[in-house]
Image (cartoon, helix red, strand yellow):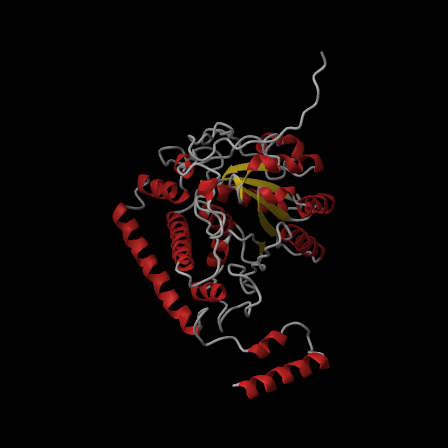
Amino acid sequence: MTPKSSLHIPHPSARPGEKPDFSYLKLSEAGAVARPASGAHASEIENLAHELVRVLDDNGQAQGEWNPGMTREQLIGALRLMLLTRQYDDRMQRIQRQGKISFYMQSLGEEAVSIGQGMALEAGDMLFPSYRNQGLYILRGSALVDMMCQCLSNTRDMCKGRQMPIMYHNRKGNVFSISGNLATQYPHAVGWAMASAIKGEDHIAASWVGDGSTAEADFHHALTFAAVYQAPVILNVVNNQWAISTFQDFAGGEKRSFAARGLGLGIPGVRVDGNDILAVYAVTRWAAKRARQGGGPTLVELVTYRGGAHSTSDDPTRYRPKDEWAAFPLGDPIARLKQHLVTNGYWSDEQHEELQKNLEQEVKEAWKEAVTFGTMTEGPKLGLHEMFDDVYAEIPEHLEQQRKQLLAFKGRSS
């Protein structure tokens, strides 16, 4: 008898109260994946889209051809930036819970993605981040005070109160504005990279989306343009297993890897351990070299785990096991880098504890300064007249009249 068709509905590997199950993850041993030449054709390296590039083994030792040979100074610098990002996240999360800011999103467990990739790129490269890439802003020189003021929407808010919290930008550091509309940054990155190529520049673009955003049309439009015009761009999919409360399989991760999405267009895909900063750094350097040499785009899937809630509006205990992050087989990126440093005699528990205390104090002092520019309940506050600025290059007469009327009304009512 011929079987009838039926609707397939993906299911997460475990629900609240159940034992975490990551058996669906396809892992490779550290050092097992060969590193091809950066100019290899996509058809020659399809295995990279299905295997998992890993450098750090379970003992904290670097293995294989992808070992980037990062110096002691680079590794300690990366550890500091990852710890600073986590300290900033922790502070802002607690501040939101105290009602001092309205909203926040952590990158807990994903720090190696932003720091590892940011370190592998050059200052002139343009970054188009997602809302869990605060590490990129910290790496590119955004002051903690400025980032906090943006979350407070106070008088020093870089967005002048026109964006929701965590939607930072850093023009000087070549980090584009964060958008709350999913995947819009992908076409932006491809367009910027195409323009760079037209101008004959050596700069490339990089962008980040989550696994859930790969179901958005902008994701596919960007891949098509990048493939057709061989745009010098790195398109990253941060597969942290969850799109809010929706398991990654609902975006298509059940059938093939997200890194394989570009193969049909001739875009090479690379799956990398997103919690191994050495592997992240190495793959990004490889993809960047490929783009600068005219090899076009690369689609990189960073396999990681969202350690916290999607946002402060979310309760992950309603849809996944409480201890799922602790059971994630790729571990904590900070703990793994620390282990590597200690194993090689570069670091100690005492140095680690001292660094954590210093960074905690740095974040604390930044918050003290940030609130002097205003809070949600106390002044100083942004001037009402500023709502008319930065809309047009030259303010039209009708808006100028509205501004004068507003100021006159405010003067009469005060």
Q: Position of residue 28 (x, y in %)?
A: 49, 29
Viewport quadrant of the N terminus: top right
Q: Identify the residue at image location x=39%, y=45%.
A: 334
Count up the numbered dots: 0
Q: Is residue 381 above or below residue 96?
A: below
Along the horizontal axis of the image, is 314 left or right of 84?
Answer: right
Residue 32 in sight: yes
Q: Residue furthest top?
A: 1
Residue 278 in sight: no
Q: Residue furthest front?
A: 413
Along the horizontal axis of the image, is 72 left or right of 194?
Answer: left
Along the horizontal axis of the image, is 328 left or right of 352?
Answer: right
Q: Identify the residue at image location x=44%, y=70%.
A: 377
Q: Position of residue 169 (x, y in %)?
A: 55, 62
Q: Nearer the viewer, residue 83 or 390?
A: 390
Q: Residue furthest left?
A: 350
Within the image, what quadrant is residue 346 found in?
top left
Within the image, what quadrant is residue 69 found in?
top left
Q: Nearer the viewer, residue 228 or 346?
A: 228
Q: Position of residue 306 (x, y in %)?
A: 47, 43
Q: Identify the residue at image location x=41%, y=70%.
A: 371
Q: Position of residue 336 (x, y in %)?
A: 38, 40
Q: Is residue 37 above or below residue 363?
A: above
